[in-house]
Image (spheres, grey):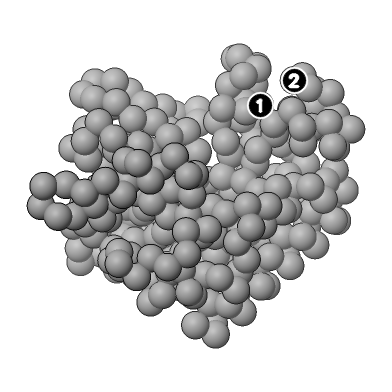
Amino acid sequence: MTLDPFGTRLRRAMDDRGPLCVGIDPHASLLAEWGLSDDIAGLERFSRTVVEATADRVAVLKPQMAFFERFGSRGVAVLEKSVEEARAAGALIVMDAKRGDIGSTMAAYAESFLHKDAPLFSDALTVSPYLGYGSLSPAVALARENGTGLFVLALTSNPEGGEVQHAVRADGRTVGATMLAHLAAENVGEEPLGSFGAVVGATLGDLSEYDLDINGPLLAPGIGAQGATAADLPRVFGAAVRNVVPNVSRGVLRHGPDVSALRAAADRFAGEIREAVAAA
């Protein structure tokens, strides 16, 4: 199986389905809100329901690996099945695992998610570059080989992130700006969109001091429960807004376990995002 590059497939999915990304975050409080038990049975029901409700209509689903790993190997098995079913329904999978290491260890992390024969094969993987951007080289190489992509933590929405990402280097650039520059270099000449994206929080307000035009996607958490709205996207992302993949988790998931209600919530957010981007 030879895949088109992730950026090509993502652009196509965003144009066809809209740019919405729905998180699959089965943390204990959401399982309880759904009336589910905090065990494998509850996890499987939750994940299967989200996939059933959304995988045929949203561009991207983003499972949070930690919420499956906490159940051990049986939880990972549930995730494997969910990834398989979601991709079969046409959704792209961004595995939110935030892996980051050096050398052979980074290569092994990459093989776990980005190799075409891996049980958890995903279209893209979130990674942490804070052992140095060069530490991601094995993942970059494997992504290019397999038509997959990366989302690199650059300007995250958590308040603690600023102490690292806004720190100023000797060359006068912030660490976050340096990560964006690395990604822009990875995506040079790629059409219609590069495969190496950044995680940039939708809650961060004015980002005009940063060059977000990396010719790659910008995964933007923060819409919904964290306080950002679709209408904020043009102000935060400026000219790069067409390449933004806004992530909504609780804003959609709180409407479960009713499949129709989940679909309606996803459709509503997708429509609001389309309108905001079109008006920019």
Residue 100 placed where, x, y %?
33, 30
Which quadrant is the N terminus positioned in?
top left
Provide the residue designation for mark 1. Answer: 78
- Front residue of 40/181: it is 181
Secondary structure of the residue carrying numbered label 2: helix
| Mark 1 surroundings within 10 Å by alpha-carbon count, few (fewer than 14), some (14 through 19), many (20 or more) | many
Residue 199 placed where, x, y %?
42, 51
Q: Can residue 190 be seen in this view?
A: yes
Provide the residue designation for mark 2. Answer: 40
Secondary structure of the residue carrying numbered label 1: helix
Residue 230 is tagged as none
Of labels 2 and 1, earlier in sequence is 2
**Quarter of the figure with residue 268:** bottom right
Amino acid type, residue under disc 1 in the picture: Val
Q: Is residue 209 above or below residue 247?
A: below
Task: Please give left or right for residue 102 compared with residue 21 in the image.
Answer: left
Task: Please give left or right for residue 170 compared with residue 226 in the image.
Answer: left
Q: Is residue 260 above or below residue 24?
A: below
Q: Is residue 52 above or below residue 265?
A: above
Badge 2 vs badge 1, beta-carbon distance below 8 Å: yes
Q: Residue furthest bottom?
A: 279
In the image, what residue occupies the spot 20% across and 63% down? Answer: 188
In the image, what residue occupies the spot 77% across and 36% down? Answer: 30
**Quarter of the figure with residue 99:** top left
Residue 167 placed where, x, y %?
26, 46
Q: Is residue 125 above or below residue 184?
A: above
In the image, what residue occupies the spot 38% across and 71% down? Answer: 240
Disc 2 from disc 1: Cα separation:
8 Å
Residue 158 placed where, x, y %?
49, 44
Amino acid type, residue under disc 2 in the picture: Ile
Q: Is residue 148 visible?
A: no
